[in-house]
Amino acid sequence: MNYLFKNKKSTIKKLPKPFLLVSIFIVIIILLNFLAPHALSETVHWVGYPFWFLGGSVRDIVYNTSNFFKTKNSLISENKFLREKNTELKTNLLNQEIIIKENKKLNEILNRNKNKNIILGYVISWPPSSPYDTLVIDVGADHGVEKKDKVFFNGLVVGEIYDVFNRTSLVYLFSTSGSKVNVILNEKTPVIAEGIGGGNFIIKLPKDIDVNSGDKILLADTATGLMGSVEYVETKPSDAFQNVFFRSPFNIFEIKEVQVLNEK
Amino acid sequence: MKNNMIRLLVDIILFLSIFIFPWWISLFLILFSILIFDNFYESLIFAFFIDSAYSFSLFSNINFFFGMSIFVSIFFVFSYYMKRIVEFNFFK
């Protein structure tokens, strides 16, 4: 017959307190993730609202201070470049006005006028603050913003509303690394573009499809959703496919105000 | 007492950094604070704040929104064992 030693210590070791607390935290996180992932987002956005504005002001001060120390020569050359660009844009705008009028007339004839509502919003948090490449804008459910609404900047579509809170909304950028979006290349070829971050996209196409730099890229879901133009086409003799790179014509991290298209 | 004041100050800076600084600065500050303070549980809350404020999921089948929280949790446990070998004596 076997007997236990009287002084035998328990073999079960106690877990260290930090380890135990972290385990509980992870369990809560996993449960939250599957049950209500954005349950506390509303509160965090409510708390963060004034601090995001503070961050914006700090950013502006830093930007203006760095501009103050620019050399005279660089300012002269920048001024010259901007004047030339302004003339070019004025000419383009004249053409655009005619096109918009024509488009409106055609929509009226075809009875395709939906009840569209454009909401102007200011960006209060940019991707460098967000590890997930998302924007936070200062309009939310109180202003009529809804999930899946398209977000535009100067007429170009940049993303869509992912989550709506009372005073703020979370915008997911189409150019986020790994995201896939249906686009129309050159107004005729439907393809899938993959975001590679920072407002850049890549499209993989068979070599026989003719693509040139400057070709327009439209978002497939909306008729007016221009996303950018082709910057560079990469072809390799050993590869049956070609890589088409395109990007938004502006720096995605410098967007200050956006338009939210709410289609009811 | 002095250590507690420093810890409180770091907490305030970390909280503000979530909304003002780029995310990598916030993450660096969180990880650094875990190393220099004993049982810096606030780090988990700050990581949770970042996830709640900015996260979204691209995957259609498995949605996971708390990547930063899990990363900080793992680092927290790792630092617990690391501190047994290496001593960080910034405020001692």
Image (cartoon, coloured by chain):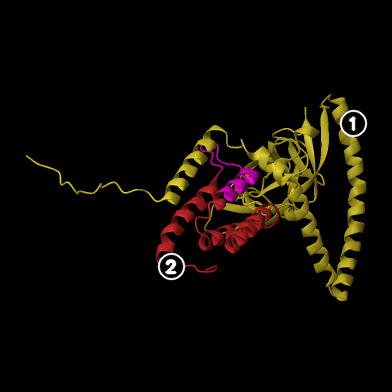
Chain colours: A yellow, B red
Residue A219 covered by magenta stretch = no
Q: Point out the stretch of residues depicted in magenta.
A: B45-65
Look at the image and tell me whether residue A188 can be seen: no
Label 2 marks which chain's residue?
B
Relative horizontal placement of residue A73, taking residue A227 as reference (left or right): right
Q: Residue furthest top?
A: A111
The reply to whether discs 1 and 2 touch (Cβ–Cβ < 8 Å) is: no
Q: Amino acid at mark 1?
A: Lys
Which residue occupies the foreground of this view, A75 or A13?
A13
Could you tell me residue A58's position as x and y percent?
A: 78, 59
Q: Which element is circle 1 on?
A: helix
Residue receiving disc 1: A105
Residue A92 — which label?
A: none
Name the foreground residue: A63 vs B36.
Answer: B36
Image quadrant in which the N terminus of chain A is located:
top left
Name the amino acid type tagged 2. Answer: Val
Q: Quadrant of residue A165?
A: top right
In this view, the residue in front, A193 or A151, is A151
The correct choice, above or below, for A113 with respect to B58 in the image is: above
Instruction: Identify the residue under disc 2.
Output: B86
Q: Residue at x 83, y 64 (%)?
A: A64
